[in-house]
Image: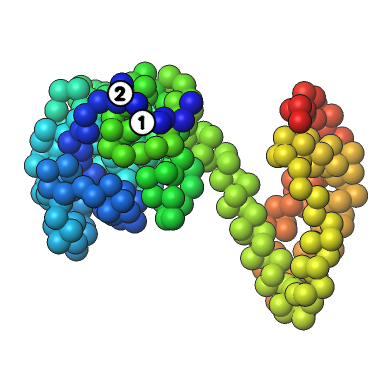
């Protein structure tokens, strides 16, 4: 369930922001946090200076984590484990480490092992939309044995769209990362299509054709339909997409995504075991 304000929500916690990039700064500004609400640690000195200018407490890991009940780890993906290792020894008793970074479930479990080995409490947190313009309304998914506790603290801190998806660390990040296969993949396919259309001088015609053929439907139906088409016609479609590869190459466009489409269509051809049997009711 999505969290809504209620009498059961605890008092606003003192929290630490580990990493002060777009997400951390957006959340702090939206909530109106100052040095009485939050402290910031970032390995980038310029970001620490900026946080200080905004009225937030700043310092090294030990200072930022002192007294923090809730920790939001919002670093870059390549720094997830390093941040956990650097900060774990400084977590106070009962502090919850909410790892909101976009990394694989296995990486989240590695980070959890580091935090828990030091006596900390780890929660897998997935941020499902851009933090701007959603700000504190951004959808958050939580997983881990302390996810319900983290939900209450996040709600008290001002977040309004929070859902617990299970007790297993990695479940929230699995939803996020697998969803990104489609979301980020469509972006990449769009770029490849538009580069080719622009080079061929057929942008308006291509876009109009897509508008004419687009049939809005729930994603459950779309997924079942798309997979059935590949299973039934994958070999023929792979051959067609090989010609799309040649078309883009002839225009000087590297068909990075389209080559993958050829391989996936061919791999799915005839694989009736991969059909979605139980389609969602609409």
Position of 14 with respect to 130 (left or right) is left
Residue drawn at x 27%, y 37% as measured from the top left: 157
Q: How many marks?
A: 2
Q: Position of residue 86 (x, y in %)?
A: 19, 40
- The residue tagged 1 is 5
Position of 131 with respect to 73 (left or right) is right
Q: CA distance from mark 1 to mark 2?
A: 7 Å
Residue drawn at x 34%, y 51% as measured from the top left: 23
Question: To which quarter of the image does residue 228 belong?
Answer: top right
Which is nearer the eye, 31 or 69? 31
Which is nearer the eye, 81 or 142? 142
Q: Position of residue 16 (x, y in %)?
A: 20, 40
Residue with the most extreme front position: 7
Q: Position of residue 140 (x, y in %)?
A: 43, 37
Residue 269 appears in the figure: no
Question: To which quarter of the image does residue 39 belong?
Answer: top left
Residue 23 appears in the figure: yes
Residue drawn at x 32%, y 45% as measured from the top left: 74
Instruction: Confirm or deny contact between disc 1 and disc 2 (CB under 8 A).
Output: no
Q: Position of residue 143 (x, y in %)?
A: 42, 26
Q: Is residue 191 above or below residue 161?
A: below
Question: To which quarter of the image does residue 229 belong?
Answer: top right
Q: Secondary structure at mark 1?
A: loop
* Colour scheme of the rendered structure: rainbow
- Circle 2 packing at 10 Å, graded few (<14), some (14-19), many (20+), is few
Residue drawn at x 28%, y 33% as measured from the top left: 156
Rendered image: mark on residue 146: none
Q: Secondary structure at mark 2?
A: loop
- Circle 1 packing at 10 Å, graded few (<14), some (14-19), many (20+), is few
In the picture, which quadrant includes the C terminus? top right
- The residue tagged 2 is 7
């Amino acid at each position: 369930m999505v969290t809504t304000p209620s009498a059961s929500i605890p008092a606003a916690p003192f929290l630490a922001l580990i990493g002060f990039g777009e997400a951390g700064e957006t959340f702090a500004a939206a909530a109106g946090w100052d040095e009485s609400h939050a402290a910031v640690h970032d390995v980038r000195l310029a970001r620490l200076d900026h946080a200080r200018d905004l009225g937030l407490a700043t310092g090294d890991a030990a200072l930022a984590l002192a007294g923090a009940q809730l920790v939001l780890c919002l670093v870059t993906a390549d720094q997830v484990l390093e941040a956990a290792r650097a900060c774990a020894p400084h977590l106070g008793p009962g502090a919850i480490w909410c790892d909101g970074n976009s990394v694989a479930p296995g990486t989240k479990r590695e980070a959890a092992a580091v935090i828990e080995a030091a006596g900390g409490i780890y929660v897998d947190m997935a941020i499902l939309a851009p933090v701007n313009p959603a700000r504190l309304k951004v959808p958050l998914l939580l997983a881990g044995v302390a996810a319900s506790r983290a939900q209450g603290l996040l709600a008290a801190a001002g977040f309004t769209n929070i859902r617990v998806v299970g007790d297993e660390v990695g479940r929230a990040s699995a939803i996020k990362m697998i969803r990104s296969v489609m979301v980020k993949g469509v972006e990449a396919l769009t770029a490849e299509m538009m580069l080719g259309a622009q080079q061929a001088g057929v942008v308006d015609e291509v876009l109009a054709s897509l508008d004419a053929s687009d049939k809005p439907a729930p994603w459950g139906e779309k997924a079942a339909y798309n997979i059935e088409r590949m299973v039934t016609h994958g070999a023929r479609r792979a051959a067609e997409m090989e010609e799309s590869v040649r078309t883009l190459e002839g225009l000087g466009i590297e068909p990075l995504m389209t080559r993958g489409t050829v391989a996936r269509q061919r791999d799915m051809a005839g694989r009736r075991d991969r059909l979605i049997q139980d389609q969602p009711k609409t």
